[in-house]
Structures are given as structure tokens and as C-alpha cells.
Image: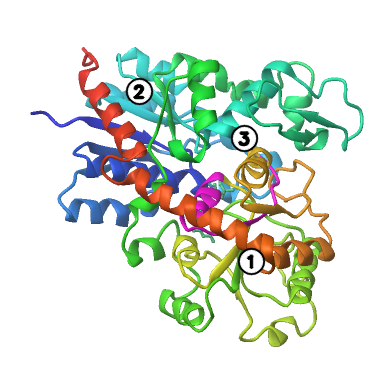
Amino acid sequence: MVKLQVFFFPLMTHGHMIPFLDMAKLFASRGVHSTIITTPLNAPAFAKGVQKSNDLGFEMSVKILEFPKVDGLPEHCENADQVTCPAMLPIFFVATKLLKDQLEQLLEEYRPNCLVADFFFPWATDSAAKFNIPRLVFHGSNYFASCAGEQVRLHRPFENLINDSDEFFVPNFPHKVKLCLSQIPPYERAEGDTEFAKMLNEAESQLRSHGVIMNSFYELEPEYVDHYRNVLNRRAWHIGPLSLCNRSLEEKAERGKQAAINADDCLKWLDSKSVNSVLFVCFGSFTKFPSEQLHEIAMGLEASGQQFIWVVGKGRNDKETEDWMPEGFEERMTGKGLIIRGWAPQVMILDHGAIGGFVTHCGWNSTLEGIAAGVPMVTWPSFAEQFYNEKLITDVLRIGVGVGAKEWVAGTGGGNIKRDAVETAVRSIIVGEEAKERRNRCKGLKEMAKRAVEEGGSSYSDLNALIQELSLYPTSI
Ligand code: UDP
């Protein structure tokens, strides 16, 4: 029998490349030939995973497209994580749009059975259609946030609000979910379609595509799986948590980029701590806090008296210096707090029994990794769909406490949360009766997540159904 061939085409940013690689590995482990499409400087991020998969007898490969040259981007910038200011992002997206011709040449030459393309490439639907190839959308989000975003976009419940703090409920929703005006992205609040909103024309691109792949599992958000499918009438398959396809310690330690800490040293540090006693503080691959905010986090963590691992990415503050560091902070925290400057082996850390709380920006990968590891969260959203993810964590699943972030700001994380708010939130996630109850709910979700990806589980079965459907799809001519 001829192998099913699926092409995977992620946006060049680690928050998308990581789940795409997991997804491609997962498909390959089910007998599909998975091919990842990327650009020269991003290819190394996939090399090890692809090699390992092939060593295990699965079939994976990488195809390279040249990154288009456009004015206004730094030299050698092929990854959105490298843009030096948020205003450059639209230029980056213009560059990715210029990949269309090269993509079409690949599709014409190889005629895969399916193209799974990033949500940020709405134009890929037409490219695939030219060759009668079904295009699936992957936006790296979940049902809850997708439903909320769509209901808010359609009904604009914030329309008559004036002040940033004025509140509204998400319309037509199974749960009562309240947000305030400043948590809605500015391009959505604007009258008419801005260029950015147009580019993100999610509804159109998704409705014309074959359907959506969700990094989620049924038991996590059953009402919203049903809402998405039956109320919004979208076709979707949930196949997550994708991070769970990384089973060995090595795979978990090497996920994404080269870690800035030796995995053994990190584990030794964690092994010396008691169960549920350490906070993991990490804000994803993209958010860069201003120095003032980093300073408040340091003061809040110290005042809380809790132990922590804090990922302050290299050059992640606005000035590339450590002027945020309170005097003597690192010395005082010796043995109690570990600072990682650069990339952390996040999944490996979250899975360690010593971790008792996760301070997160609510990026969906991080959120689901926290859920799969059974860790309660302090929520600190800043952009994309992160404010919706926060509501899922705090109000629906009741496994987290908000730090009080209210302002949608791309890239720089708002930056006005005071040390007292940090101290209160992090202490309450580790200490007290409510913390215990939250932890128990997390344990239940962790078990459900594990079962979902095992043979016969909800995600396992949905992936089977998808592969079956693709193999019956009339092949391209
Ligand atoms: N990540 C990591 N180490 C870091 C920072 C991030 O492994 O130091 C991974 C994290 O595990 C997750 C991804 O990068 O898989 C970040 O994705 P998410 O959706 O949480 O946030 P984004 O980076 O897109 O804002």
C-alpha cells in the first residue's frame, strides 16, 4: 500500500515550530510519511527530531524554501522570535506570504495527500486547492479560545464600552466568561478590518479549508468541542496534548532550542527539593518584559518566600542588561531560586515532581504542557488568545489564579504588575487549602490527558479518524 504523505508547514516561530514537529512525529508514528516545510535557518530546529524518528523506523523528511528578502527586517531574520520590535511583525508576515510560489512548486512536484499549514498562512488554502490537496489549519490554540474569539468577533459585545476596565460577557457561551475592554486586541476593537485583521481572516480561511487540527483533548473542554463543531459548524480533530509524544527524558530536555542549562544539573537541583515546593516561572518564546517588570517579579518572588526556577531569556529585557536585578538578589536566592538565562527544558522541568506551580503567560503550548504535567498555574496573559486561555484555566477548569494582567500588548507583556500581586498569586498557588483542591483537580486532568493519547483514547481515536478520512480523499490528479 502507498504511504499517506502529509506536508506540515509551520509559521517560523518556536511557539509554532515546536507543536508542528510534535504533530509531524505523531503522524509518522502512525505510519504516515511526514514532511516538514521550513527555511534554511529554521531547519536545524527540526533536524534531531526528524533523525530520531527515522532511526525508530518511521518516515520523516524536511523540505527547504528560501526565505524571501524584504526591506525592514534584520539580516538573517527568518524567525518571528528574532524581530526586534513588534512593529516589524507585519513585515515578517509580508515576507512569509512571498513563500507562496515556492510552496506551490513543492506541492506540484510531490502531490502530498494533505497540507497542514499554519493558521498564519491563510493563502495556503488556495495553493493546496490548485492541486486538489486538502488543506488543514493548525493555529496551535484550543476549542475554548477559538469559540470565544469567534463569538466576540461576530457579536462585538464590547462595542459600546468606553473605559479599558469596562466588562462584558462572551455571548452565546456555555460558561459565564467575563473580560474587560483592554483585554481585546486593538486590531479587533478598531472599526472595519485593519490590515492585520484581514491577514488573520481566520473564519474565511478555516471555512474554506478541509478543517482544523486542535492541540487539545475532548475531556478537557467537552462543551467547547461540541460548541465548535455543532454551533459554529466547524470541522475539527483534536489530537493532543502533542507534547506527550515526547516520552524519553532526552526528547523532553532537547525540545525547541538548545537549553541554557545542563539537563542533569537542572534535575539534580530539582531532586534536592520536596514534592510540589518549586515554582516554574516562564513566559514562552516571544514575550519580552521591560526591566521594570522583571524587577517587580524578582521582588515579588523573594517576598513570597517560595522556591523557584525563573527563565529570564537571554536579552529578554529591553536593554540587554541585568539592570532589573535587585542588588544582591541572586546571592540571597542561592539554593532557593535558580535563574535560567536563555532557553529552558520546559517540559522536562514541568514533569518533575518538585514543581508545584507554573507562572505562565498562558501561551497554549505552555498551558497544555502544564495541564499534562498536572501543575496548577499563576496566569499572566499578554497577547494573542492568551486572555481567553486564562479564563479557561481560572474560571472553567479552576486550576489557576490570575496575577491581574488586564492589558493586551503584543510582545512586551503589559508590564505593570506590581510585586505584591506577584507575591500573593505565587504564594496562593503553593500554600493553603484551596491550593490543595486545585492540585487535586490538576491530578485528574493529568490522568485524562494521558488516557486521551493512549490507544482507544479520545485524541488517539480522532487522529485515526482523520488519517482514515485522508486516505479516502480522492487523490490529486
Ligand atoms: N519553551 C521552552 N523553553 C523556554 C521557553 C519556551 O521549552 O525557555 C517552549 C514551551 O515548552 C512551549 C513553547 O516553547 O512549547 C512556547 O509556546 P507557547 O504557546 O506557550 O508560547 P509562545 O512562545 O508561542 O508565546
Q: Which residue is drawn at 56% across and 18% down?
A: 203
Task: Classify residue 144 as left or right of residue 27.
Answer: right
Q: What stretch is highlighted in magenta?
A: 364-383
Under circle 2, the secondary element is: helix
Near mark 1 (Cα within 10 A), the count class, few <14, some 14-19 or many ≥20, is many
Location of mark 3 (residue): 91
Could you tell which of marks 1 and 2 lies nearer the N-terminus?
2
Q: Which residue is drawn at 60% across and 33% down?
A: 145
Location of mark 1 (residue): 312
Near mark 3 (Cα within 10 A), the count class, few <14, some 14-19 or many ≥20, is some
Q: Percent from the top left, x then y, of residue 437?
A: 61, 58
User: In whole angstroms, how far apart are the C-alphas of marks 1 and 3?
Assistant: 27 Å
Could you tell which of marks 1 and 3 lies nearer the N-terminus?
3
Near mark 2 (Cα within 10 A), the count class, few <14, some 14-19 or many ≥20, is some
Q: Which amino acid does label 1 sit on?
A: Val
Q: Percent from the top left, x then y, of residue 170?
A: 71, 27
Of 306 and 69, nearer the camera is 306
Location of mark 2 (residue): 104
Q: Which amino acid does label 2 sit on?
A: Glu
> Does the closest atom of ligand 1 sit within 8 Å of the Cβ of label 2?
no
Q: Do labels 1 and 3 touch, CB within 8 Å? A: no
Under circle 1, the secondary element is: loop
